[in-house]
Image (tube, grey):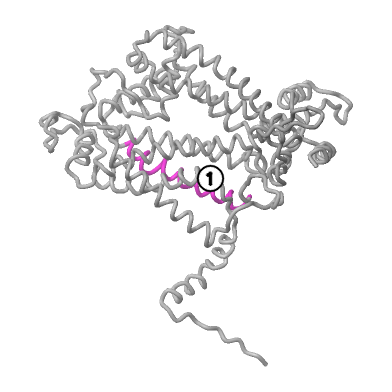
Amino acid sequence: MTTTVTTKPTTKAGRAADYLDERLGVAGVVKEFGRKIFPDHWSFMLGEVALYSFVALLISGTFLTLFFQASMVETTYDGSYVPLKGIHMSAAYASTLDLSFDIRGGLLMRQLHHWSALMFVAAATLHMARIFFTGAFRKPRELNWIVGVLLWVLGMGAGFTGYSLPDDLLSGNGLRIIDGLMKGFPLIGTWLSFLFFGNEFPGTDLINRLYMLHIMLIPALIILLIAVHLLMVVLHKHTHYPNPGARETNVVGYPVLPVYAAKAGGFFFIVYGLLTVIAATFTINPIWNYGPYDPSPVSAGTQPDWYIGWADGALRLVPPHWESVIFGFTFSWNILVPVVLLGGFIAALVAYPFIEKWITGDNRNHNVLDRPRNAPTRTAIGAAGIAFYATMWAAASSDVMSVFFHWNVFLVTHVLQASLIVSPIIAFIITRRVAFALQRKDRDLVLHGVETGHVVRYPHGEFQELHRPLDEYERWRLVSFEENVPVPVRPRSDGKIYNKDRRRSWFSRFFFENRVKPVTPDELAAAQHEHH
């Protein structure tokens, strides 16, 4: 008969870990999670930058909540900023001034909070662009793409509610635009405005309502979606770029423990440190220059944060006097059309993975990423979307551009209006042709090698440049993509061909037409024989 002797930990930390493991089973979870592989490629760091910027937002925001007063009660400023002494203002604006001038470290935390918000949305935008152009949204990650779009929208919502809290002139003008948008909806517009502001604009309790949205509801939703996003990453495994040493179901990188965790920890401090340096060096949102909000003055040249600029620009690009009176109700198309345009853009982002799957008929699991040049139509669609977004974003600064460059403001507006339609088409055509050209270049490199610039003369008098053959990995990387073919029109089980099948076939031909075929094994063998 044998007996098993269990050795108990002797240190306090060991006993504490053993206590938690016996009750929560954390050792198995940590062991399983620690074996997960994360890819080691710079483009995957964009998501990390967004995550670490959000952590900086939580840290700095916690500090700000200790001193900010979310109240619109009128008070008289008596702080240390002399130009505003004796001015009547809301308690929210006065407390923000105190944070900037009278509370130790307050201005640094305000600016760290603001720069972190800008970095969060910027990194999330670039992260989504990387996912789109490499096809990382394909099955089984369609829902994770939707989570990413929702995080992007919530990030903009958090930013808007945040810079509206100080109740300064700039944020007040932005809220007035929101009030006009709500009232532009027929039948329900007035009720929407009253529900949001609590009374006639600007209301009596608006700052407190925005404060609850900014520090409770929106952050809670963002944290929940980040947790869901990371959970899906763990469940579906991470995507990776093509590598001859990896199978379709594996990824190329390092395990979470200890390599990736150490790298991620160091990278967090780098991101946080750089944000702190930027906050300590570059002034942002100097509300003391704007003054408290007053509905009567409207400052020229005011600009929202960059991620809201596309919404402001969409309103500026709408033609004037675009209204209709139907059954006694006024329909303000100059408000309704931009709202539908913005909502349609976000809806298209959400639906794109399913649209592409329907067009291509590809229902396989994808763990290996595409090179953007090998999916030219998708890459061109992404470039067109960026051109569409960038035009609206630039339109938010139409007045600033006209003043700075001494251009006619109406001419700038008309050019941007035309660009909103023309620039996506031009971007689509040029990007698609460039992708095809890059594919042909890759094919030429595989078959003929790299030009060396070394020209030799043969005994029969011919001059010829020598080419260096690609090494095995370079050649594999250039030929390792699949040849996608259009979905043919075929009768269904009842022998009929439906119109939706024809439409799908047309879109599929458009998606894959003019494709450059990968190098075949026979062509590669012939090229290698020629080089030899």
**Quarter occupied by the N terminus:** bottom right
Alpha-carbon neighbours of circle 1 within 10 Å: few (<14), some, or many (≥20)?
few
Magenta segment range? 209-236
The answer to whether 161 appears left or right of 139 in the picture is left
Residue 27 position (above or below residue 477): below
Residue sitting at x 48%, y 80%: 9
Q: Residue furthest bottom?
A: 1
> In x, y percent, where is residue 483?
76, 34
Tell me which corner region of the image, top left, top right, bottom left or bottom right, holds residue 335.
top left
The residue identified by callout 1 is 42
Residue 523 sits inside the magenta stretch: no
Q: Quadrant of residue 432?
A: top right
- Can you tell which quarter of the image residue 213 is in? top left
Residue 268: x and y in percent read 42, 51
For image coordinates 21% across by 31% down, the residue present is 288
Q: Nearer the viewer, residue 384 or 333?
A: 384
Looking at the rendering, in which quadrant would you find the C terminus?
A: top right
Q: Position of residue 152 (x, y in %)?
A: 48, 36
* Residue 313 located left or right of residue 278: right
Please tell me which residue is depicted at 58% across the width and 42% down the height of the picture: 144
Amino acid type shown at disc 1 = Trp
Secondary structure type for disc 1: helix
- Percent from the top left, x then y, of residue 236? 63, 50
Direction from residue 60 to residue 468 in the image, left or right: right
